[in-house]
Image (cartoon, rainbow, N blue to C red):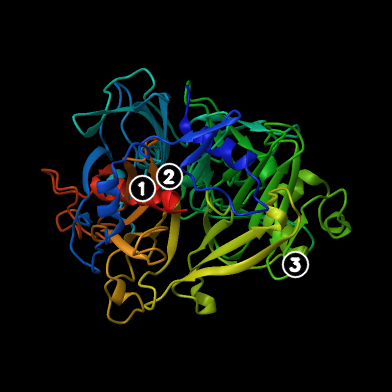
C-alpha cells in the first residue's frame, strides 16, 4: 500500500533543516526532485491571473449549517449510525481523519481512518444525565462503549463525490471492547493486553503506513487512579460510570495507539507516556529512527517528544518533556534522574504517571497543548495551545518550536508565539492544524457549545466554530481567513488532505451537542429525515483549494 505522504516524511528527513527548506512543490524521490502532482505545465496566462487572486473569506455565522467560502463545496461521506458492513455501524463524535490510498498512482481509492472521541449519551443510548434520578443500564453502557474508538472504511471518489464502498472487507470498527496489546515488556496493572481504546481525539501516521490514534480524556470512561504524597493509591469515579459494569484498570487508557489498516490489529505504545494525548506527529530521521511529538490536552499540562534509539521503533527510546522557558527537552528517564528515583519505583511507573514526573522536573505548564504539525517549508514545529480559562487565557495561541540547527533529535530549542487568538486576529481556541501541499496552514477552532453565541461570554464575536487558512503565497499571504463555519454546537476537526491535494477530509463533530430534548434538538444538521443531528465526515473540494496550491508555482517561478 503506497502513500504519497510517506514521500513527504522522507523529504523532511533528507532536507537540510539548518537552512530554509525548499518549497514543498519539490518532493524528494531517491536522489531526484520532481514537481509534485498538480504543479507543472500550468500556462503562463493562468499563472498571471492567479497572481492577482484574492481569497474572499467569510464573516462569522451562527447559522445551523456547514457553510463554505465561495469556490468550495462538500459532500457527506459517512455519518453516525451509517452501516459500514453487515455487522458494524459508524461511531459517534468523529474527530481525527487520515486517508491512505491503495496505490499512490490512484489517490481516489483507499482507506479512511476516523477517531470516535466520545459519545452523546442522549443520541447513542437514550440516557439523559439532565433528568434527576436517571440511572444507566448495562445495555446503555454497551451502546456507548461500541460508539467510541475508531472506524476503518474504504472510500472512493466517483464523479466528484467521495463515497463509502459498502461492505468492503476492509471496513471494520475498533471499539472500547476490542482487545489491544500493550507494547511493553512489563505488565501494566497486571496485564499485557488492554480491553478497548477510547477518548480518541487526534492522531497521526507512521512512515510505515499505519494509523496513530490518541486517547485523550480517558478518565471520563473508567475513572482515574490518584496517588497521595505517600504514594497511596485510590480510584476516582468516571463521568460515564462504565466501571460500574466493567471494572477495567484506568492505567490501560491514556496512550498512543497504533492501528494496522490492513487487518485492524492494534497496540498501545507505553514508551510515549500516559496522559491526555491530543495527537502524535512523527518525523523520520536519516537513520530511520523516529521522533514523536505529542501534547497533553489539559489545563497547565505539558508538551512531549519521544526520540527512538532504534530505527522504526516506538518502544526503544527516551521520552522528553518541554521546558519552553529555557528551551530544553528534559528526559523522563528514571535511570538518570535522581528526582524521579525518589518518587517512582521504575521507568514503567514514570511513564504511567508522566504528568507527575513532568512536574517534578519542573517542565513548563502550557495552555492545553493540542494538535502539532511540522511546517513543510521552514521545518518549524507548530503547537496549538487552545486556552486556559483559569489563567485568563480564553482565546489560546499557536506556539512555534524551532529545534536547534533544525535537528529534530536536538535537546534544545527556541519557543515563541506564532499567532495569538482573539478578536484582533479573528479566531479563538485553535485546535487542529494541517499544512497542505503548498504550505498553507489550516486551523480549526474548539469553542465549547456551552459558551458560543452567548452575550455574557468572550466568544460572542466569533459565533460558530470555524475552519481558517493562512495562505503562504499571493496577496493574502500571512492573513488568517475563515473558509468554513460549523453547524450549531459543532466543531470542525481532523483536517486531512488527499494525496493529490484536491480534497480536504474534515469531521463535523457533535452538532446539536447542547440538545436537552430529542424533540427539540439545537441543530438538525446534516438534515436527515429524523431531524436528529449526527456527527459526520465530509469531503471538501473546489477550485479555491487548487488555486491556493497553484499560487506556490508562481512563487517558485518568480524565485
Earlier sequence position, callout 1 versus callout 3: 3
Q: Residue at x 83, y 56 (%)?
A: 340
Question: Are the two marked residues, 2 and 1, in contact with CB atoms closer than 8 angstroms?
Answer: yes
Q: Is residue 261 left or right of residue 46?
A: right
Q: Residue at x 22, y 45 (%)?
A: 74
* Mark 2–mark 1 distance (CA, rounded to whole Å): 7 Å
**Above or below 250: residue 310:** above
Earlier sequence position, callout 3 versus callout 2: 3
Whole-percent x, y for residue 145 in the image: 42, 39
* Mark 3–mark 2 distance (CA, rounded to whole Å): 38 Å
Q: Which residue is mark 1?
A: 549
Q: Secondary structure at mark 3?
A: loop
Whole-percent x, y for residue 442 in the image: 40, 55
Q: Is residue 440 left or right of residue 414?
A: left
Q: Which residue is mark 3?
A: 362
Q: Is residue 362 visible?
A: yes
| Crowding at mark 3 (Cα within 10 Å: few <14, some 14-19, many 20+) | few
Whole-percent x, y for residue 183 in the image: 67, 32
Q: Residue at x 27, y 70 (%)?
A: 463
Earlier sequence position, callout 2 versus callout 1: 2
Query: Of all residues shown, which one is farthest toward the left?
Result: 529
Q: Is residue 446 left or right of residue 202?
A: left
Q: Is residue 450 left or right of residue 375?
A: left
Q: Which residue is mark 2?
A: 437
- Please name which of the two marks, 3 or 2, marks the residue nearer to the observer: 2
Amino acid at each position: 500500500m503506497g502513500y504519497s505522504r510517506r514521500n513527504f516524511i522522507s523529504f523532511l528527513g533528507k532536507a537540510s533543516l539548518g537552512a530554509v527548506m525548499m518549497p514543498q512543490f519539490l518532493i524528494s524521490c531517491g536522489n531526484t526532485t520532481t514537481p509534485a502532482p498538480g504543479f507543472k505545465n500550468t500556462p503562463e496566462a493562468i499563472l498571471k491571473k492567479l497572481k492577482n487572486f484574492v481569497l474572499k473569506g467569510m464573516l462569522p455565522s451562527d447559522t445551523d449549517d456547514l457553510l463554505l467560502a465561495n469556490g468550495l463545496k462538500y459532500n457527506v461521506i459517512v455519518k453516525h449510525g451509517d452501516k459500514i458492513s453487515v455487522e458494524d455501524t459508524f461511531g459517534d463524535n468523529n474527530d481525527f481523519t487520515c486517508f491512505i490510498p491503495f496505490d499512490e498512482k490512484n489517490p481516489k481509492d483507499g482507506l479512511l481512518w476516523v477517531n470516535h472521541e466520545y459519545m452523546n449519551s442522549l443520541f447513542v443510548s437514550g440516557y439523559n444525565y439532565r433528568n434527576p434520578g436517571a440511572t444507566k443500564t448495562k445495555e446503555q453502557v454497551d451502546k456507548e462503549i461500541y460508539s467510541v474508538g475508531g472506524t476503518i472504511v474504504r472510500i472512493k471518489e466517483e464523479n466528484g463525490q467521495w463515497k463509502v464502498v459498502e461492505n468492503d472487507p476492509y471496513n471494520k470498527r475498533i471499539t472500547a471492547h476490542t482487545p489491544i496489546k500493550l507494547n511493553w515488556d512489563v505488565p501494566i496493572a497486571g496485564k499485557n493486553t488492554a480491553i478497548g481504546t477510547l477518548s480518541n481525539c487526534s492522531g497521526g501516521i507512521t512512515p510505515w503506513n499505519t494509523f496513530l490514534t490518541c486517547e485523550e480524556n480517558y478518565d471520563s470512561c473508567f475513572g482515574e487512579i490518584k496517588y497521595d504524597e505517600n504514594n497511596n493509591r485510590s480510584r476516582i469515579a468516571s463521568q460515564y460510570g462504565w466501571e460500574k459494569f466493567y471494572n477495567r484498570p484506568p492505567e490501560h487508557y491514556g496512550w498512543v495507539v497504533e492501528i494496522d489498516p490492513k487487518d485492524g490489529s492494534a497496540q498501545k505504545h507505553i514508551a510515549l507516556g500516559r496522559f491526555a494525548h491530543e495527537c502524535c506527529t512523527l518525523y523520520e530521521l536519516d537513520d530511520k529512527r523516529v521522533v514523536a511529538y505529542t501534547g497533553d490536552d489539559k489545563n497547565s499540562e505539558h508538551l512531549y517528544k519521544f526520540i527512538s534509539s532504534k530505527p522504526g521503533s516506538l518502544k526503544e527510546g527516551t521520552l522528553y518533556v518541554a521546558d519552553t522557558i529555557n528551551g530544553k527537552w528534559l528526559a523522563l528517564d528514571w535511570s538518570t534522574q535522581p528526582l524521579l528515583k525518589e518518587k517512582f519505583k521504575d521507568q514503567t511507573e514514570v511513564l504511567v504517571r508522566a504528568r507527575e514526573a513532568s512536574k517534578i522536573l519542573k517542565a513548563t505548564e502550557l495552555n492545553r497543548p493540542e494538535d502539532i504539525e511540522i511546517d513543510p517549508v521552514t521545518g518549524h514545529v507548530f503547537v496549538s495551545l487552545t486556552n486556559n480559562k483559569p489563567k485568563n487565557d480564553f482565546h489560546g495561541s499557536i506556539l512555534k518550536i524551532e529545534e536547534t540547527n533544525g535537528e529534530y533529535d536536538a535537546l534544545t530549542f527556541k519557543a515563541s508565539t506564532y499567532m495569538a487568538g482573539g478578536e484582533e486576529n479573528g479566531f479563538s481556541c485553535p485546535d487542529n492544524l494541517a499544512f497542505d501541499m503548498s504550505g498553507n496552514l489550516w486551523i480549526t477552532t474548539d469553542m465549547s457549545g456551552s459558551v458560543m453565541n452567548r452575550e455574557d461570554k468572550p466568544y460572542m464575536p466569533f459565533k460558530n466554530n470555524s475552519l481558517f487558512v493562512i495562505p503562504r503565497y499571493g496577496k493574502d499571504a500571512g492573513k488568517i481567513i475563515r473558509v468554513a463555519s460549523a453547524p450549531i454546537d459543532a466543531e470542525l476537526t481532523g483536517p486531512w488532505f488527499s494525496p493529490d491535494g484536491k480534497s480536504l477530509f474534515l469531521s463535523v463533530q457533535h452538532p446539536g451537542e447542547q440538545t436537552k430534548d430529542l424533540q427539540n434538538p439545537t441543530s438538525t444538521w446534516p438534515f436527515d429525515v429524523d431531524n436528529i443531528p449526527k456527527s459526520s465526515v465530509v469531503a471538501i473540494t473546489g477550485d479555491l483549494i487548487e488555486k491556493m496550491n497553484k499560487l506556490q508555482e508562481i512563487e517558485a517561478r518568480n524565485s
